[in-house]
Image: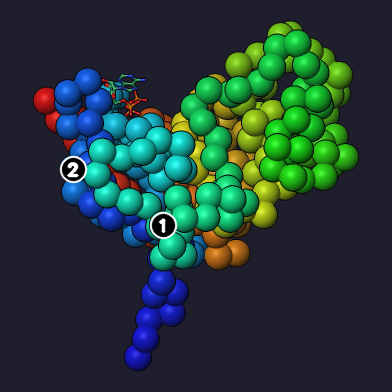
Amino acid sequence: MEKVNSTPLLRAEQLTCIKQDRILFEHLDVAVYPGDIIQVAGPNGAGKTSLLRILAGLAQPHEGQVLYNETPIGADPEQYHQSLLYIGHKAGVKAELSAEENLQFSLALHQHDANQAEALLESVGLLGFEDSLAAQLSAGQHRRISLAQLWSSHAKVWILDEPFTAIDVKGVAAIEQQILSHAQQGGCVILTTHQPLSLPENKVKTLTLKYRV
Ligand SMILES: Nc1ncnc2c1ncn2[C@@H]1O[C@H](COP(=O)(O)OP(=O)(O)OP(=O)(O)O)[C@@H](O)[C@H]1O
């Protein structure tokens, strides 16, 4: 009998990444199925961010390829872009814009309704800060502005680099819940974090990169 969900949403084939003459990883195969939550683990400098950027199509591997629904992501970048939510390890907010303007900007970039920004800010506990300039907000509040997109995204593939950095305990729990719910609805999540996850162990797969010299 054929396995349900036997086709990966995202697949990387034989990835090799070299930075400054150091092989970070080579011939790496990754298969990410609907419902998967994959934590990429490993020490500082092992190549986690490099791997996430390749999976997101933001960087090219030295060798190998990434496929979305079994089609190389380079063949239809527009379709992949629409299916992907990538939140990098820097908050990426603009200091001179307010919290709401920053979120509106991100939503517009993903062709989402920018009118929902206020409601989304409420989801991440930033109600009352809509008009505050990002320059006046904390690192955790910056991160919350970026992560508010998790409450609006229809993208199947979420790639989140250190989403919990600077986020307090209550915020982490809310984000983990959002990640779990996305996976339960057939999406997939690939994330890095140096903090232990509180998600049920059987819900998370770990991909560990070693630091190679
Ligand atoms: N822009 C760059 N230019 C040159 N080398 C880079 C660049 N970015 C990363 N590297 C190299 O790649 C290695 C892996 O970096 P990467 O950010 O992928 O690691 P990481 O596992 O995410 O680390 P961390 O846990 O510290 O975030 C680094 O040690 C560095 O040598």
Query: Few, some or many C-alpha atoms within 10 Å of disc 1 (few <14, some 14-19, many ≥20)?
Result: some
**Residue at the spot x=38%, y=32% of the render?**
49
In the rendered image, the quadrant that contains the C terminus is top left
The kind of residue tagged 1 is: Pro
163 vs 135: above or below: below
**Residue at the spot x=67%, y=49% of the render?**
153
Residue 23 is left or right of residue 202, and the answer is left
Q: How is the image coloured?
A: rainbow
The x and y percentages for residue 52 are: 40, 39
Residue labelled with disc 1: 72
**Residue at the spot x=55%, y=35% of the render?**
87
Mark pair 1, 2: CA separation: 19 Å
Number of residue marks: 2
The x and y percentages for residue 146 are: 65, 31
Callout in the foreground (1, 2): 1
The x and y percentages for residue 22 are: 17, 26
Query: Few, some or many C-alpha atoms within 10 Å of disc 2 (few <14, some 14-19, many ≥20)?
Result: some
**Can you name the residue that lies furthest to the front here?**
75
Secondary structure at numbered mark 2: strand
The kind of residue tagged 2 is: Glu
Which residue is more in the foreground, 103 or 80? 80
71 vs 132: above or below: below
Residue labelled with disc 2: 26
Residue 115 in sight: yes
State yes or no: Cβ of the residue under disc 1 lies below 8 Å from any atom of ligand 1.
no
Q: Earlier in the sequence, mark 1 or mark 2?
A: 2
Ligand 1, seen in the image, is in the quarter at: top left
**Can you name the residue that lies furthest to the bottom here?**
1
Residue 6 is left or right of residue 125, and the answer is left
173 vs 186: above or below: above
